[in-house]
Structures are given as structure tokens and as C-alpha cells.
Image (spheres, rainbow, N blue to C red):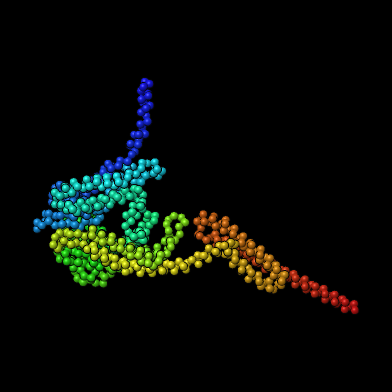
Amino acid sequence: MAGVIEMTARRRPSAPLLTRMRDCSPGLGGGLVGGAVAAGLGLASFAVLVMLLWISSPYPDSGPGGALHVAAALWLLAHGAELVRVDTLSGVPAPVGVPPLLLLALPVWLLHRAGRDAAYGGVTGGGGDGHPADGEGDEGPPLVPVRTSWPGVVLGYLAVAAPAALYAAGGPLRPSWVWAGLCVAAVAVVAAGAGVWSAYGRPGRPLRRALGVLPVGVRPLLLGPDGRPGVATRAAAAGLGVLLAGGAMLTALSLVGHGAAAQGALLRLTEGWSGRFAVLLLCAALVPNAAVWGAAYALGPGFALGAGHVVSPLSSAPAPFLPPFPLLAAVPAEGPGTPVHWAAGLVPVVAGVVLGRRVAKAAAGTERGGTSPGRGRTEAWSAGRTVRATGLAALLCAAVLAGLAALAGGPLGVSVLARFGPVWWQVGLAALAWLVLLAVPTALGSRAWHRRALGADEPRIGRQREEPAESADGEGGGRLRRAARRRAGWFARVGGGREARADGATEAATGSGARAAVATPAAGTAPARGAAGARPGAAAGAAWEEAWWGESRQTSEVTQDTRTTRSSETSEAEDEGKAEGEGKGKEKGEN
């Protein structure tokens, strides 16, 4: 027994070792599993949606195997990969390269979550955001190194994407191997990297290291010293948001104006409610594409609806035989542009003004230096730095919009349908020209106006800070004392020097009383009224009113005392005169 007890006692220290093994980071294996799960969930989501539409369809063209092939092809198309349709009427394979941008949101979100969870080692704090719970951030296991978690997620995702592409190749929509390999890998690397970066608290060092190739004066404009986006980045995001929102608004207005044509296209395209529901889902997935197309239309280059057929505010020439589709029915009719079409130019004008004002706010020194306490306004920029920041913001906004235009378009067939959507380099150049021509003057003008406004405000702010020192006894008390002096001055002039001295003494007492009347309610009554929900300034108003009527009553008492003193002195003088007259009469009588 003693030996058993001794062996048991020796094995007890192994518990901390098991705990450390259980709590250690899973490393590359956890990343591989996370990436594979993310790819599997994405494929399953597309498969469920396609199978539901296939089941509800009254006239399915193929069996469940064909529906699953289509689901795998759509999953690859959501990453931006180009597909090739082989069962065409002419027998010539037709490329399908317009990816619905809204479908890209699901793979990106799944990869982001997988990268973040892989960096946490699969340990979450019980919250929906995946961060450690409050009070447990320091007690949990350390984060998995980036060189392990990030490649693990990417490799696990690609390990599932490759068989999916092979499976889709046996269906009616076959992926282009070059585009599938490039697009799926790029989405996996970027989205998983963003997830790992967010798990580490979004540090600014990797971004600063990536921006090291740029000039020194450009880096702070793109990335702030605290890791937040710089002035040029925020201004570019604001301008891009205005352009995309304006493009979406133009699309919506065109759909409303061509509502009958869009409804007719929907009814001609399919007859069953399941088919119409599928068409509506496709239109919803193409809404971001339509917003980019609308922005390109507002900028001037427009978009192509077939080779050699461009739709722009100046002229509209769509292809003569377009497939019936609700979004294509909203395209302006063929012919030259009208003032209604030219009004779309207001969108880049507003975008340029917004971008310029965002830069001017920082250039004038009106932005705070940060969110930490004690940080005041930043220094005002020179005109040259303002122009450089505005030009950099315009360049960044134009580059991002050009990339979106490249993603939002592509071929839908051969021959005439080989070009569909905006031309990315034309959109980029047009956006850069619009923004530079409008944002630079706006930034310089707004900067000068803000600086002049700040210069005009500085003396007033100084006087406001000096006034409380002067009015320690209350602003109302000073006015009351001056009013009391004006009232008592007439009686002092009538009563003579002695009355003036009495009034002066009484006025000094009244002034001190007014100061006490104003100070006492402000210290006692105002907090009580504020706690009860009174309006701001009600306590001060009550104090001034009380001081006013109190001093008025004191002034009335002073006036009454002055009149009484004057009457008594006049009576004494009359009595002295009578006594003197009687004395003189007696002397005359004796004489």
C-alpha cells in the first residue's frame, strides 16, 4: 500500500502538464481546420439555396447532381472567378464573368471569423465578437503566432476549394482554372489576414511596415500615429461613399422611371413564382454592381452593354438584342442625353466637395489631436500640405473605385456580349479628374474660412474666460448696484453732503448684500433645482430676481430714511427760526 501511495503521490504533479497541453495553442492544425470549415460552410450555404430553388421549380432541367454542380460554380463565381458555359445554342463556349458582389460578403465573413478564431487558438470569451471575456483577457492562453494561424487558414480553405472546382468542372458552368486559382487564393489571403489582424487588436505596425515604400510625408496622411486611418484615408472613404450612394440612388430612380419595363422583363423571363423569386434574388445580389455602374455613369465614362455600345449621360447606345432582365430594363433609352441625364453630374460634384471639406477640417486645425483627455486642436497646415493631402485622397478614392469597376463588370458571352460593365481605367481617370478639380479649391477655401473663424473666436473666448473673475459677485449684482446709484443720486443731491455720505454708506451695505444674495442662491439653490429637472439657468435667474427685489426694497428704505431725515432737519430749522424770531421780538419789547 505504501508503494501505491508513493507512486500516486509522484504522479500528481502531472496534472499541470496536462493542463498546459490542453490549453496550448493548436497552431497550424487549428488553422487548417478553421479554413476548411469556413469553405465548407460557404459551399453548404450555396448548395442549400440552389437545392431549394431546384425543388420549388416546376420544370427542373436536371437532377440534384446538376443543381449541386451549379452551386459549386456559383460559390467560385462569388470569389470573382470566371465561369465558362458550354451548353450554348451555337455550340461555342460563352464566358460568364460578372460576379454578383453581394455574394462575396459570405466567403469574406467566414474567412474573417476563421482567421480570428485561429489566432485565438479556438478560445473565445463567450462573447459574440470572439474576444476574451472581461477579466479573463490576461488569464487565457497566448495568441497563436501569425506565421502559423494565417497560413493555416488559407491552406485549409484552398484544400476545400480545389475539390470544389474539380467537381464544378463536370457541370454546365465550368470554372476557368487560372481565374479560379488567383481569385480564390486572393480572397482567402486578404480576408483571413484581416481576421488575424483584428485578433491582435488591429496594430498599426504591419500597416506602417507595408507603407514603408512610400515617401515619408505621405505615410502620416494614410495612417495616423495612433494606428487609425489618416486624413487622406478618411477623406477618400467619404468621397467613395458619396459616389457609391449616388450611383445606387441613380439606379433606384431609373428603376422607378422604367418600372413598367422592368416588370414586363420579369414576367417574360419566367412564369413560375419560384423562377421569379430566383430572378429577384439575383437582382438583389447585383445591387452593389448596379451602384458601381451608376457611379461610372455619373462620372461620365458610363458602362458598356456590349462591344461598341456605351451608355453615358451624353448618349445612350445599348446593344439591340439584350436578354430580358429587370436591371437591364432600367437603362436609359437609345439617343442623345437630355438635361435629366446630365443632372447625374451632381454626384461627383458632391463627392468632391465632401472630400475637400474633410481634408480642410484637419488642415485648419479644427480636428482634435485624439480622443485622449487633454489633447487640443492640431496645428494648421500650410496650403501646400493641404493640396498634397487632397490630391492623395482623390488618388486613393479613384484607385479603389477603379478596382470596384473592374470587379463589377466582365463578359457575358462572345462577340457583342464580350464587354459588359464599366471600363475600369476610364472610371479611375474620370474620378481622379473630377475630385482633383473640385476637392482642391474646396479644401483651400474651407481651410481659409475655418482659420478666419478660429481667429475671430479666440478674443471672444479670452474675454469669456476673464469675465467670471470680474463678476465674482455676479453680473446681475453689478447692474443692480449701478441702478441703485442712479436712484440714490437724486436724493443725495437734494439732501446735501450729509445725506450723500449716508447714501454712500447705505450703498456699500446694499452692494455687499446684493453680492451675498447672488452668491448664496447660486451655491445652494441651483444644484437643488438642477437635480429636480429645472431648466438650465433657472436658479441663476431666481437668484438675480431675489437680489433685484431685495435691493429695490433696501433702496426704498434708504429713500424713506432720507426723506424722514430731510423732513426732521427742515422742522428743526423752522423751530430754530421761530425760536430766534420770538427771542428777537422779546428783545424789541423790552427795549
Q: Quadrant of the N terminus?
A: top left
Q: Is residue 37 above or below residue 575?
A: above
Image quadrant for the C terminus?
bottom right
Query: Does residue 359 appear to the left or right of 585 in the view shown?
Result: left
In the displayed orientation, state which residue is furthest to the left.
90
Q: In this image, 335 relative to 479: left or right?
A: left
- Asked if one can make out residue 576 in the rendered structure from this viewpoint, the answer is yes
Residue at image x 68%, y 71%? 492
Instruction: Measuring from the top left, give residue 534's x and y in whole percent.
Output: 51, 58
228 shown above or below 390 = above
Residue 377 horizontal side relative to residue 506, left or right: left
Q: How many marks?
A: 0
Residue at the extreme right: 591
Please identify the quarter of the rendering in which residue 446 is found. bottom left
Q: Look at the image and tell me whether residue 58 can be seen.
A: no
Residue shown at the point (21%, 70%) measured from the top left:
315
Q: Position of residue 206 (x, y in %)?
A: 33, 52
Left or right of 312 on screen, residue 239: right
Q: Nearer the viewer, residue 111 or 334?
A: 111
- Say which quarter of the image contains residue 311: bottom left
Where residue 25 appears, x then y in whole percent? 32, 41
Q: Residue at coordinates 14% horizontally, 52% vertically from top-left? A: 172
* Residue toward you, 504 or 227: 227
Q: Residue at x 23, y 58 (%)?
A: 407
Residue 445 position within the rendered picture, expressed as x and y whole percent measured from the top left: 38, 69
Question: Which of 546 and 2 lies nearest the eye of the viewer?
Answer: 2
